[in-house]
């Protein structure tokens, strides 16, 4: 199956939103999706770009969403926030193509790490990443993601010192 | 003891590099640190920075015996959740040991320090009585949260090691939640040869 990968543009945000929701349904967390394609549109400039998969006929069937991060030990890194291919187009190397593209983009910016997160029950994804040589830092070293949001974030902000 | 917190500038990179090294040396993992002062200058203070920093400073009369007035920092960057939108990630939080347990109003409080990726369990202390203390580390973390909110972020994220119970308890007591434990997300990393191979077109 021939496919093309390209950088995302603002006009893609509606399709990005559609696929974000499809991925959330797969992850059994569709109630967690709060942002719309309008938010994505204004935030695309803020931070992220995507790479897209386009098949003949220019149907958008997959995407990867990434941004740059930093390690005070090793320096520049790239974080793969989302990687998604619509179910009917899997098995054709599209996911691998997207992930490799993100790694390539990161390499051009001298990133030395590519990081992501995966749900513990998502065995196909975990197997996929394992074949790509990804280490599981949670299982291997005990790292946990911690988050402040909503009221807990507001409470923390209220304790900030005055300038 | 009076202290101030301000945005880091490129001249602070020497002290940030020093404090990164101090922490790594204390944890006996200094061989893991590859980032130099020059990397910090380039990566944090060019047109599209990879990170931002805030610095905690004390007045001259409280400088360390080596003459340092820059005695703590937090390093953060903006990230994105495709579900919730803009987020802020705190990569490092550090206060030099002799400046821990200090509140601006003179009250003594113990606090959690050193929550960066390279931190070691030994560097964490917690006082069950003074969890509400407003020490320098807490002030730095709150400032990062404030900066995030001002930038339209609705999440502050970071990582902590699972065996670091005192640290985990401290953060959970402040209302945050453990995304890994509660939702099952694992942190994954590709680097070195695996990354080189992946980046082949």
Image (cartoon, coloured by chain):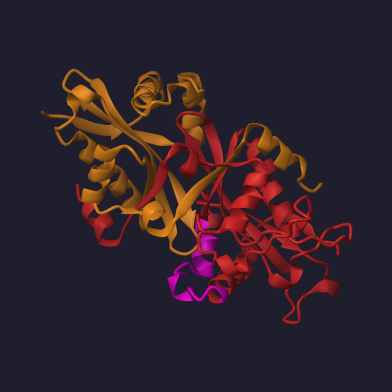
Chain colours: A orange, B red
Residue ID at (43%, 26%): A29
| Residue B35 placement (x, y as % from top left) | 47, 67
Task: Answer left or right for B23 relative to B30.
Answer: right
Residue ID at (79%, 66%): B58
Number of numbered callouts drawn: 0
Q: Is residue A132 magenta?
A: no
Q: Is residue B31 magenta?
A: yes
Please name whichever residue, B8 or B176, is drawn nearer the observer in this view of the structure: B176
Is most of the magenta stretch helix, strand or loop? helix
> Would you identify the image quadrant in which residue A22 lies?
top left
Task: Answer left or right for B86 relative to A58.
Answer: right
> Would you identify the image quadrant in which residue B20 lies?
bottom right
Residue A110 seen: no
Please name whichever residue, B42 or A71, is drawn nearer the observer in this view of the structure: A71
Q: Farthest residue toward the left?
A: A1
Residue A75 seen: yes
Residue ID at (54%, 76%): B25
The span shown in magenta is B26-43
| Residue A97 placement (x, y as % from top left) | 21, 39
The image quadrant where one finds the N terminus of chain A is top left
């Amino acid at each position: 199956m021939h496919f093309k990968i390209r950088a995302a543009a603002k006009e893609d945000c509606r399709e990005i939103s559609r696929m974000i929701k499809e991925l959330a349904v797969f992850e059994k967390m569709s109630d967690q999706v709060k942002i719309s394609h309008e938010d994505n549109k204004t935030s695309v400039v803020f931070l992220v770009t995507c790479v897209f998969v386009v098949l003949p006929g220019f149907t958008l069937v997959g995407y990867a969403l990434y941004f740059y991060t930093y390690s005070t030990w090793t320096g520049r890194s790239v974080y793969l926030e989302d990687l998604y291919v619509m179910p009917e187009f899997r098995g054709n190397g599209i996911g691998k193509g997207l992930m490799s593209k993100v790694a390539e983009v990161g390499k051009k910016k001298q990133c030395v790490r590519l990081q992501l997160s995966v749900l513990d029950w998502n065995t196909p994804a975990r197997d996929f990443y394992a074949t790509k040589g990804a280490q599981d830092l949670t299982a291997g070293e005990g790292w946990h993601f911690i988050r402040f949001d909503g009221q807990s974030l507001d409470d923390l902000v209220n304790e900030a010192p005055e300038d | 003891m009076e202290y101030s917190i301000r945005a880091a500038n490129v001249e602070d990179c020497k002290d940030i590099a020093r404090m990164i090294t101090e922490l790594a040396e204390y944890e006996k993992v200094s061989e893991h640190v590859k980032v130099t002062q020059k990397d910090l200058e380039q990566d944090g203070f060019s047109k599209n920075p990879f990170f931002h920093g805030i610095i905690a400073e004390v007045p001259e009369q409280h400088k360390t015996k080596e003459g340092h007035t820059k005695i703590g920092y937090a390093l953060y960057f903006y990230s994105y959740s495709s579900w919730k939108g803009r987020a802020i990630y705190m990569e490092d939080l550090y206060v030099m040991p002799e400046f821990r347990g200090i509140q601006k109003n003179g009250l003594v409080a113990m606090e959690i320090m050193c929550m960066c990726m390279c931190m070691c369990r030994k560097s964490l202390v917690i006082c069950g009585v003074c969890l509400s203390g407003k020490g320098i580390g807490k002030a730095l973390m709150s400032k990062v949260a404030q900066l995030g909110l001002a930038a339209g972020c609705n999440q502050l994220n970071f990582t902590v090691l699972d065996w670091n119970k005192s640290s985990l308890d401290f953060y959970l007591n402040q209302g945050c939640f453990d995304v890994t434990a509660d939702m099952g997300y694992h942190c994954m990393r590709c680097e070195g040869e695996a990354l080189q191979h992946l980046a082949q077109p």
